[in-house]
């Protein structure tokens, strides 16, 4: 059962320290970070860069797991080690450097090889909120994924390999209330006004002879009136075809008396808000129809509120989600704007109270404390009810053994995706190579790089065949590049991959923004990246 979020209390010094990021994810998001416990597997440059970003962001605690010692080569690609630490424990050294960046973070280290820990002590990972697994080979990835899913621990894989790299999230389910979309339509209900808004609109005369009053009628009033006027002559329907939308826009323009009427210009620009379909979106409909919306005693707070939303939409919502209650700026008299604000605010409060009661009833019905989900959480849910997201991720093992052949063939045949899917396949092939020859292709041991390239070109087709795509061959130059990489972690690529990984970790922990789906593959040769959903 998911623990409900309570309104955090944050000290002034903490607010000042994290001021900039608080503007992005707020105190609730920051509190989630400060309560999180992160485990990093392998603290090479990729892992160190990822953890550095999280430590600076104020993550609660970190545990670094790495059994290796600092070598001379590490000084060239890892800023978390120095010359004095050569020969020392890498986990201890990196942990100490990270601790210096933010003394509020609790830092621990374990001097053990992550591959061995995965095999010998799987219960070790259950203590963490999230595990960042860097530079793991395929076999260890599959085993760790099983362990973390069983323990309900979030998992992020990150790997840099020469001029390529990948990031992959693996979580059973990730639910998001505050998805913060870049662009989203204001919830003004111009296409479906409720009675109180209609009554207010009816009190305002669009034919007023006062030019000052005419120029300060809010566009909300103008469009609700014009939509009603249109519907009366079109069988109660709003504009739907391109021609009808153009006609409606011209109708609004025709009401302009002079060119300096900003309110009517705003109305013309906002006509598309009238054309928006009524009711909830297809995506929200899928969420409320999800099998998890049939809640029980162990259901998370999110799904309990989704169940309440389903009831609300079918009853007092009349097909709509709870009103958000916010209004954009617009040209208006002060009196009209304040009255509109009150109408929207009151409707949003009423909807939230209805949702709150439904949440309590559902909790009582499944034998849980009716007040176990806070008012603040329900209020946030209502405000973002049109923006809910549910992300589910395939197990790594499933993706490796049974990928979507259709997507795979599409990527292999696409000029845009061919390099990304090629590197994805080759990152699996080099693990097979290492398992057979006890080294990665191109790693210097006095051998011939051409021989390694030949071996890799033999292994790669077998990986493609296992994925269900017989007959495809990867470009020879791509195989040669993988050998030239020699499994090196270049700092510039590691910093980029580590940055992407830490960004996704923050999304997962704060439950804000939408984390990436599929496998993110970076191609440093062509300076581009793609997300593969296999």
Image: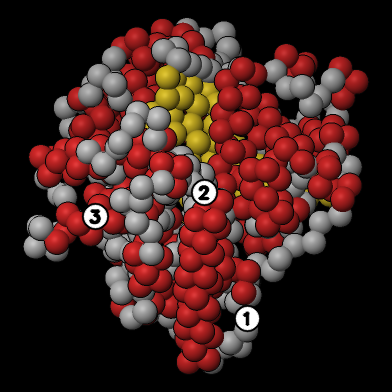
Residue 229 screen position, x and y as percent: 20, 57
Q: Residues within 10 Å of mark 3 (few under 14, many from 20)?
A: many
> Are the residues flagged by discs 3 and 1 in contact, CB closer than 8 Å?
no
Farthest residue to the front: give it: 209
Residue 305 lies left or right of residue 292; in this view the side is right
Q: In this view, does 357 lie above or below 210?
A: below
Residue 42 screen position, x and y as percent: 67, 37
Residue plotted at (52% across, 54% down): 337
Residue position for label 3: 227
Residue 52 screen position, x and y as percent: 73, 34
Residue position for label 2: 333
Q: In this view, does 170 lie above or below 243?
A: below
The answer to whether one can see residue 339 in this image is yes
**In which image quadrant can residue 126 be found?**
bottom right
Q: How crowded is mark 2: few (under 14 residues within 10 Å), some or many (20 or more)?
A: some
Residue 479 lies left or right of residue 282; in this view the side is right
The numbered mark, 1 or 2, whose residue comes first in the sequence reads 2
Give 56 or 246, whichever is nearer the viewer.
246
Residue plotted at (48% across, 31% down): 166
User: What is the secondary structure assignment of the residue under circle 3?
Assistant: helix
Residue position for label 1: 372
Q: How far apart are marks 3 and 1 (CA)?
A: 43 Å
The answer to whether one can see residue 63 in this image is no
């Amino acid at each position: 059962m998911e623990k409900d979020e309570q309104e955090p209390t944050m000290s002034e010094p903490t607010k000042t320290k994290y001021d900039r990021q608080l503007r992005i994810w707020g105190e609730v998001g920051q509190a989630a970070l400060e309560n999180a416990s992160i485990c990093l597997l392998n603290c090479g440059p990729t892992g160190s860069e990822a953890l550095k970003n999280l430590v600076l962001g104020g993550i609660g605690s970190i545990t670094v797991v790495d059994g290796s010692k600092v070598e001379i080569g590490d000084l060239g690609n890892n800023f978390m080690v120095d010359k004095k630490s050569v020969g020392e424990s890498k986990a201890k050294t990196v942990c100490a450097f990270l601790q210096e960046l933010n003394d509020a973070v609790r830092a621990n280290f374990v001097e053990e090889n992550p591959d061995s820990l995965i095999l010998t002590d799987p219960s070790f990972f259950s203590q963490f909120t999230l595990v960042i697994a860097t530079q793991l080979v395929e076999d260890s990835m599959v085993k760790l994924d099983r362990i973390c899913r069983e323990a309900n621990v979030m998992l992020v894989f990150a790997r840099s390999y020469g001029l390529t790299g990948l990031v992959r999230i693996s979580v059973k389910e990730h639910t998001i209330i505050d998805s913060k979309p870049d662009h989203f339509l204001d919830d003004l209900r111009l296409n479906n006004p409720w009675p109180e808004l209609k009554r207010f609109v009816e009190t305002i005369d669009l034919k007023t002879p006062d030019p000052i009053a005419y120029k300060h009628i809010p566009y909300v009033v103008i469009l609700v009136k014009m939509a009603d006027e249109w519907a009366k002559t079109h069988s109660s329907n709003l504009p739907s075809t391109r021609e009808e939308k153009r006609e409606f826009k011209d109708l609004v323009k025709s009401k302009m008396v002079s060119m300096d009427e900003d309110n009517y210009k705003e109305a013309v620009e906002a006509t598309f808000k009238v054309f928006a379909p009524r009711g909830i979106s297809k995506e929200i409909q899928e969420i409320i129809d999800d099998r998890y919306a049939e809640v029980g005693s162990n259901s998370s707070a999110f799904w309990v509120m989704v169940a309440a939303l389903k009831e609300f939409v079918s009853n007092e919502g009349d097909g709509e989600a709870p009103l958000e209650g916010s209004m954009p700026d617009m040209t208006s008299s002060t009196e009209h704007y304040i009255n509109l604000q009150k109408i929207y605010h009151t409707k949003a409060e009423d909807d939230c109270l209805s949702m709150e009661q439904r949440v309590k009833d559902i909790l009582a019905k499944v034998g849980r404390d009716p007040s176990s989900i806070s008012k603040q959480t329900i209020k946030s849910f209502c405000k973002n009810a049109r923006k809910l997201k549910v992300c589910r991720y395939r197990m790594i093992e499933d993706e490796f053994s049974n990928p979507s052949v259709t997507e795979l063939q599409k990527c292999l045949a696409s000029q845009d995706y061919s390099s990304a899917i090629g590197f994805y396949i080759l990152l699996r092939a080099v693990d097979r190579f290492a398992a057979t020859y006890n080294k990665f292709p191109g790693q210097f041991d006095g051998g011939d790089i051409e021989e390694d390239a030949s071996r890799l070109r033999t292994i790669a087709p077998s990986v493609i065949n296992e994925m269900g795509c017989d007959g495809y061959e990867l470009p020879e130059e791509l195989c040669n590049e993988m050998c030239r990489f020699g499994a090196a972690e270049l700092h510039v690529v590691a910093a980029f991959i580590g940055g992407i990984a830490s960004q996704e970790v923050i999304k997962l922990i704060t439950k804000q923004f939408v984390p990436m789906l599929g496998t993110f593959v970076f191609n440093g040769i062509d300076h581009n990246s793609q997300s593969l959903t296999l």
